[in-house]
Image (spheres, helix red, strand yellow):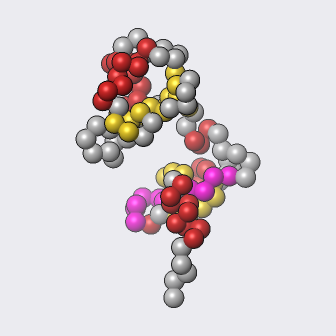
Amino acid sequence: MRFESKKEMAKALMDGRRFRNLLGREIFFDANERGNPFRFGGVDMQDTWGKFADEWTEIPPWYENIPEHGVLCWVWDDDDEDKAPIVITRKSLAVWANSEPMTLKEVQKYIYQEPEK
């Protein structure tokens, strides 16, 4: 797809949609990012707004592409402090009020952390 304007691209990103260009670089909106929440390949998108006319492929949300073996996620009901690591499968996704996949750094920390004494 191609965006008709910067405004159309910004609205799609703020609606939580993610896109990838032909070179594999992703654009997305990160509300937790200080400064400019519009990200291009994980960095500030400030100088790349002219790329709105490029060809983009929408990336489906992670929960629409759960593999058979599942996804290692943080899950919680109402309180962020009560997050727990769980492997989410298509069948177990609806059990939790909130879930998000772990980042690579979080997975590495979780796997290699020292046991509590």
Task: Determine whether 92 is above or below 114 in the image.
Answer: above
Q: Is residue 101 left or right of residue 5?
A: right
Residue 100 in sight here: yes
**Residue, x 55% and y 37% (percent of image)?**
61
Q: Residue furthest bottom?
A: 117
Q: Position of residue 50 (x, y in %)?
A: 36, 18
Q: Residue furthest right?
A: 68
- Comparing 22 with 8, the one in front is 22
**Residue, x 57% and y 41% (percent of image)?**
62
Q: Position of residue 25 (x, y in %)?
A: 50, 32
Residue 11 in sight here: no
Task: Determine whether 89 is above or below 83 in the image.
Answer: above
Q: Position of residue 55 (x, y in %)?
A: 52, 17
> Image quadrant of residue 31?
top left
Stretch of the chain drawn in magenta: 70-81
**Residue, x 42% and y 40% (percent of image)?**
42
Q: In the rendered structure, does residue 96 fall within the stretch colored magenta?
A: no
- Comparing 52 with 91, the one in front is 52
**Residue, x 32% and y 27% (percent of image)?**
47
Q: Residue furthest left?
A: 35
Q: Give the total of numbered labels.
A: 0
> Image quadrant of residue 9?
top left
Q: Position of residue 52 (x, y in %)?
A: 41, 18
